[in-house]
Image (tube, helix red, strand yellow):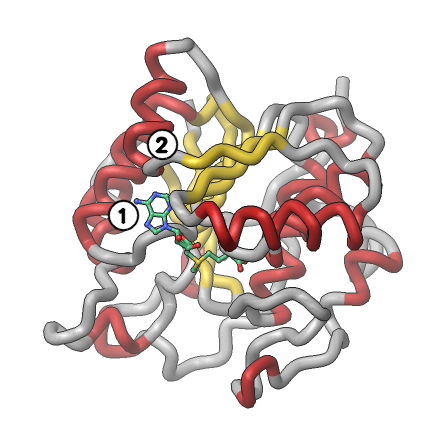
Amino acid sequence: MTVATMLETIRYPDSFLGLSELGKKPTPYKPTYAFSGSYINENHKYYSNCPTGHKGINVCIDIGIEGYLQQGDAQKLYELAYFTADDILELGTYCGLSTSIIAQAIFDSKKEIVFETVDIDKDANAKAQKNVASKTGRAPVKFNILDATEFMDKAIAQGKSYGFIFIDHWHGYEATYEAAMRVKRLLKSGGFCLFHDYNDPANTDPEHVYGVYKGANDALLCDPNFDFYGLFGCTALFRKTV
Ligand SMILES: C[S@@+](CC[C@H](N)C(=O)[O-])C[C@H]1O[C@@H](n2cnc3c(N)ncnc32)[C@H](O)[C@@H]1O
């Protein structure tokens, strides 16, 4: 039995926000796995107090890799990757910020799992590969250049499954909805999926491209096999229950 399967999980259903409330209330990191203490280890704690202000944006962490994650997002990514006993999929590598956090957590947890990340941008991917190697050394990551929906369809056809899926590629409604519908097939029972930019007020603007909030909700909120698990930073966490 792995550490993750021994630990209870904690839901925060009251953290759910209606569309008009997005971005208006603080949604700090809280643990999903009931580990003891406030942090898993020093690397996890680092993201609670790491430098911020990337590109002049106060809430974005600034740890030497281009990207737009908040401290709460980074802590949640580390935790989920650390405790997930099964393979991990990330949609949206960009320059490797979230990828390096997930890879570090896998390395620290001493698990032998497969971590795949997907993006369509070859130039950013070359940077990501360098950035991840410089931050995490030997942590194994499989980089894929492919459209996310295409990757997921292939993965389903190949019978792949994951314990944790991070969705952070194109933030439009269609792409998010397509990913969330495929997550249903790709997640193992008990697995988690985390949507970045779900708790972002841009989702409320009909003129803005963001449709993460609506896309994820339309696919998962009405699905009896999924529970809403909470908001952390600008992310939303759902769990497949059966
Ligand atoms: C918000 S960034 C990802 C940020 C990254 N997770 C981080 O922590 O910095 C979105 C990325 O998704 C990629 N992307 C956009 N549409 C995509 C698609 N249809 N399939 C795969 N990747 C896509 C973009 O090239 C971009 O690198």
Residue at left offset 81%, top offset 52%: 40
Q: How far apart are the alpha carbons under marks 1 and 2?
A: 10 Å
Work out whether mark 1 precedes mark 2 in sequence or the reverse, and give the earlier one.
Answer: 1
Residue at left offset 56%, top offset 35%: 143
Q: Which mark is residue 97?
A: none
Q: Residues within 10 Å of mark 1 (few under 14, many from 20)?
A: many
**Residue, far top:** 158
Q: Quadrant of the N terminus?
A: top right
Q: Residues within 10 Å of mark 2 (few under 14, many from 20)?
A: many
Image position of 201 with respect to 82: above or below: below
Q: Mark 1 CB in 8 Å range of ligand 1?
A: no
**Apparent side of residue 241 relative to residue 182 in the rendered image (left or right):** right
Foreground pick, 62 / 217: 62
Residue tagged by mark 1? 176
Residue 79 appears in the rendering: no
- Residue 92 x %, y %: 45, 48
Element type at marker 2? Answer: helix
Element type at marker 1? Answer: helix
The amino acid type, in three-letter code, at marker 2 is Val
Residue at left offset 36%, top offset 32%: 183
The amino acid type, in three-letter code, at marker 1 is Thr
Image position of 137 with respect to 26: above or below: above
| Marks 1,2: beta carbons within 8 A | no
Q: Number of marks in the image?
A: 2
Residue 14 appears in the rendering: yes
